[in-house]
Structure formats: C-alpha cells, structure tokens
Amino acid sequence: MSRAPSLRDDPVVVAALRTPIGTAGQALRDVGAADLAAPVLAELARLGPSLGLPAAPAEVVLGNCMGPGGDVARVATLAAGLPHDVPALTVDRQCGSGLAAIEVAAALVRAHGGVVLAGGVESASTAPWRSWPPPPGGEPVRYRRAPFAPAADGDPDMGLAADLLAEEHGIDRPRQDAYAARSHRLAWAATEDGLLDEELVPVGGLARDERPRKGLTVARLARLPATFRAGGTVTAGNACGVNDGAAVVAIAPGSAGLPGLRVLATASAGVDPNRPGLGIVPAVRTALGRAGLGLDDLDVVELNEAFAGQVLACCDELGLEPDRVCTQGGALAFGHPWGASGAVLAVRLFSQMVRQGHGRYGLAAIAVGGGQGVAMVVEACR
C-alpha cells in the first residue's frame, strides 16, 4: 500500500528518553511516580535548546494508572524544575496511558503548535493502598485494582483473560515459552551491545533495566507452573512483570524541520472487555488505515508484550509474523510499568529508527484492561 507524501505540519517526535525499568519492590522501590518522571522531563528540557527547541515546553502530558493522584504530571513537572507557567495533564487509559498521552500531545501540537513533552510513569512499588468505603459498622475493604469494566459485562483479571485468549487461539505453552525466551535473549543482547544506552536516564541508582535474564531458555521456562488457572498456559515466565519506570518524548511541529519520527496517525479502539488483549488488533488496523499503510510497509514494530500468548494471538489475528515484533526485546523481558509502557514503545521506536537508522515506517501498539487498544504509526524524517 502506498502513502501520499507526509504533511509538513505533522507533529514530530524529536527526542525520546526513559528511565531504566525496575522490578517492583527492588531497585526503585523507594522512588515515587513523580520522582521517576522528573529526571526524564528535566533531561529533555536540558536537551531542548541544543535541538533548537525552547528551554521550556508549552505543556506536559503524562499517563499514569496507580499513582497517588493530585495530577502526577504537574507534580513531576515542578519537581523537574520546569517553570511554574508550564501546565500539565495526567491521562489515565490504564496500560495504554503512556501512548494515549502521546496521542493527546500530538493533537495539542497540531492544534496550537509549540513543544509538548508527553509519556507516562508508573511506580508499582509506591502505589498507595486503596479501600472501598466501609458499610455501616464494617471495616474498609482493600482493593488491588479498580474495575476495568462493569461486572455485568465481564471484568476478568488480565492474566486469566490472556490465558483464555491463548487457549481460544490455539497458542500452546511451548510456543508461548519460546516467544518469552526470545524476548529475554534479544533484550539481553541489545543491552550488552549498548543499543539502549542513549535512551536511558539513570534514576535511584539504577542505570540499566533490571529484569532481562541472560540465558533464559525454553527448558527453564517449561518448569514454571501455570499462574492463573489449573491447566492454564500462562506462567510467571511467559508473562510480563510488575514494574517501575518512566518514559517521555518531546513532540514539535513538523514545520520546525527537525529530524525524528513524524506522527502519521494514531488510533484508539474498543473490544470485548473479556478479551482485552485483542485491543491491539483494531487499533493497529485503524491507525494503519489512517496512515495509508499496510503491515508490509512497516520496518519496526513494537507491541507491548504483556503476555506471550496475548501478543501471539494479536499477531495471528493481524497476519503479522511474530519475528518482526520487538526485535530488541519487549516487555516480557524489560517489564511492564503500566502507565509508562506505551511511551516506552515510542522511545524504543525512536532509538531504532532515529538513533540507529533502521527503516522508514514504524508502529507502536498496546492493549488495555477493560477492552481497549492504542496504536501509533510513525515515519522517520532525517
């Protein structure tokens, strides 16, 4: 499928950085959400003038799922030392929040110009405990997650939904374990080869991603028990971790003439909340349609690897060869800091397509609890 030449006014991702991703309760266990995002915002603001950008952005937009509330984006913006007159918005589309924030920022740049810093942050380690109000004479009842959908529509946990999705699509345990082992192998190689160095901003004493495992084999993964149901195929090894991290990009008007990733199209979509992992599929199809491209046009594909079976089901539905996905490792290896993960995908696209010069067209997409998906199609402009 061919596409008309890009419009000069399309927003362009001109810089992209992230923290290392930590495992919940470990290296970043004492770093709150705002303090994870602030160093990345500060570094992007510091780089701005060297790229020909203003010293301060017009706005900051950050996704977050489980933070303390109080507009985490605003707290992080101030903690980063940005001027008091920079407004900030926090977006919650659950696991899709980081990519949704970039979608919102691209729309702001199209509408008003200026530079917007956008991405996401999650500190699972410091997420506050939450409780339902107690009944008369009763005690508060703690809940570990908010509802993704009304109970009448079905509100399964993501792991159980992914297990059922894999079964329905005929994706067996060996195939899931092989894909998970691949993710760790590629992530470890990318780390050792220095392919991630330029995108990382050290924070809390952590300078590299904490989760990827060297030499994680299918045989080792095969020994792990099913996690979510008896006889299931999803395990702790072929599912993502619970993680901490932040990722942010700088988006400028295309008329600025800067190199980067031109945002050709974005899309959000809804699916059955009982099978939320499939949200990637309609979002990708819509975004590609808006961009005037097909899967064969894509050079770099970053799908959030929440569960191996879920990613493989989406690949099968789309007719996308899994070996084309996350070729430097994905969330199965790096981890899934919920509100940041969609923005991590955008950072990974930037590193591969701009810093490393791989390809012309790229795709980032993520599924969302409650049955949603978010996707973005970009074009490298050098």
Image (cartoon, grey):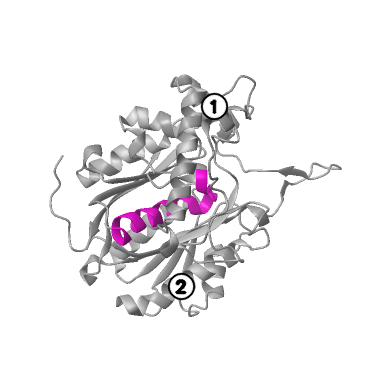
Q: Which mark is residue 43?
A: 2
133 lies left or right of 18: right
Q: Which mark is drawn over residue 244?
A: none
Residue bearing the label numbered 1? 163
Q: Residue at x 51, y 35 (%)?
A: 307
Q: Position of residue 14 (x, y in %)?
A: 32, 66
Q: Furthest-right residue in view?
A: 137
Q: CA distance from mark 2 to mark 1?
A: 40 Å
Locate residue 299 relative to residue 62 in the image: left or right: left
- The stretch of residues the image draws in magenta is 333-356
User: Where is the N terminus found, in terms of image quarters?
Assistant: top left
Pick the front one: 304 or 182: 182
Compare residues 320 and 146 and report the one nearer the observer. 320
| Residue at image location 13% in from the left, 50% down from the top | 4
Question: Where is 193 relative to 138, above or below?
Answer: below
Could you classify mark 1 by the number of other residues whose Cα lies within 10 Å: few (under 14), some (14-19), or many (20 or more)?
many
Q: Is residue 344 magenta?
A: yes
Q: Where does the image place residue 48, in percent across and percent down from the top left? A: 37, 76
